[in-house]
Amino acid sequence: MQANDSESIRARSEAVRRYFTKTPSPPAYGTAIALGGFAALCTLPALAVIVMGIGKHEWNSCFSCVSVMSVLAAIGLIFPALLSYKRGKATYERNYYLAEPKPSDAEIDEWHRRDREFLKTYAMRKLDLSPEEIRRDNRSRPLVIVGPGPSAQVRLGADSVVRFSCHDVLIIYLTPYHLAAFRCVIDLHDGAIKTETTQEYHYENVVSVSTRQSHSPVTVYVEGQPREVIVNQHFALSVASGEQISVATGFKESLALSGNTTFAETGAEEAIRSIRSRLREKKGGAADTGSLQ
């Protein structure tokens, strides 16, 4: 069973790696073609000498020397031309193998969905919450906010949805007496949790929950190349002590990808509505929760 799990994880990791690896364009073989062309030109003097010799029924030693030199030059160019072609073909095939075949967008989304489902149970254990509490106060499910993880690889799917190789996931459980939050970075390649934190706040200490504009830069990798982009929207939850939980939910830039790009559903709006509703219940009125932009 463990062997099968290990094989499944390796297969998933390889598939995700290929999904975010740029598929190379077929090589143009420009150097090989140029060298081959020069080699062909070098054979022209030899052909001319042969034609002249046949026509005059004689063989001039000077012309024969030119003929030999031109043939040698052609041979000298053919070998590097073939070597250049072989190297270009081998490089293309190697890079193509690293990028293809890619999994579908649906397969990537399914792995991401499984990761989130696992994290819901994992977060509940980390926060020491019982299933009874969850069923009573969260309708059997927590609030889940998802954004891109640090230094994530980015790819635009066929549906124009931006997908990331790792995710910043915030899971919030609303209990009768407090808000319990679990946050982690999870790698899509193998579902491994890279970092994790837990926080608990009494409702009276929560002072703001909203989506906020931001101009903070983050680094992502587009087709393997690092690019600094501006985050223009965050889900933000603030408490009286000055602490804040913030998850990126939108980029200001298009990431230089073709077409319009959008994030997958982040869960931020549903989380804001639910938390605001709970704060009104607990505080007897609306807290300063900010505007939903």
Image (tube, rainbow, N blue to C red):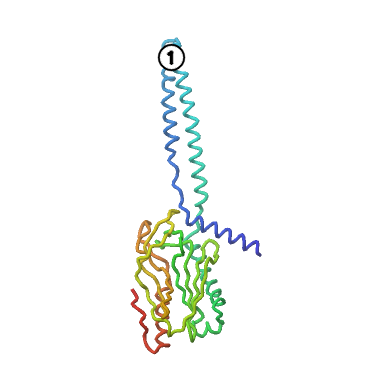
Horizontal side of 17 relative to 279 (left or right) equals right
Residue at 42% x, 75% y is: 244
Q: Farthest residue toward the front? A: 241
Horizontal side of 13 relative to 148 (left or right) equals right
Q: Position of residue 212 (x, y in %)?
A: 36, 72
Residue at 48% x, 40% y is: 88
Q: Farthest residue toward the bottom? A: 284
Determine the image quadrant of residue 291. bottom left
Quadrant the C terminus occupies: bottom left
Give the residue at mark 1: 63
Quadrant the N terminus occupies: bottom right
Q: Secondary structure at mark 1?
A: helix
Q: Position of residue 128 (x, y in %)?
A: 56, 80
Is the residue 40 above or below the residue 288 in the image?
above
Q: Position of residue 254 (x, y in %)?
A: 36, 60
Residue at 55% x, 81% y is: 129
Within 10 angstroms of label 1, few (less than 14), some, or many (20 or more) residues? some
Is the residue 110 above or below the residue 173 in the image?
above
Determine the image quadrant of residue 224. bottom left
Is the residue 257 above or below the residue 286 in the image?
above
Q: Position of residue 160 (x, y in %)?
A: 39, 61
Is the residue 136 above or below the residue 41 in the image?
below
Q: Residue flagged by tag 1: what amino acid is it? A: Phe
Counting labels gives 1
Residue at 37% x, 65% y is: 216
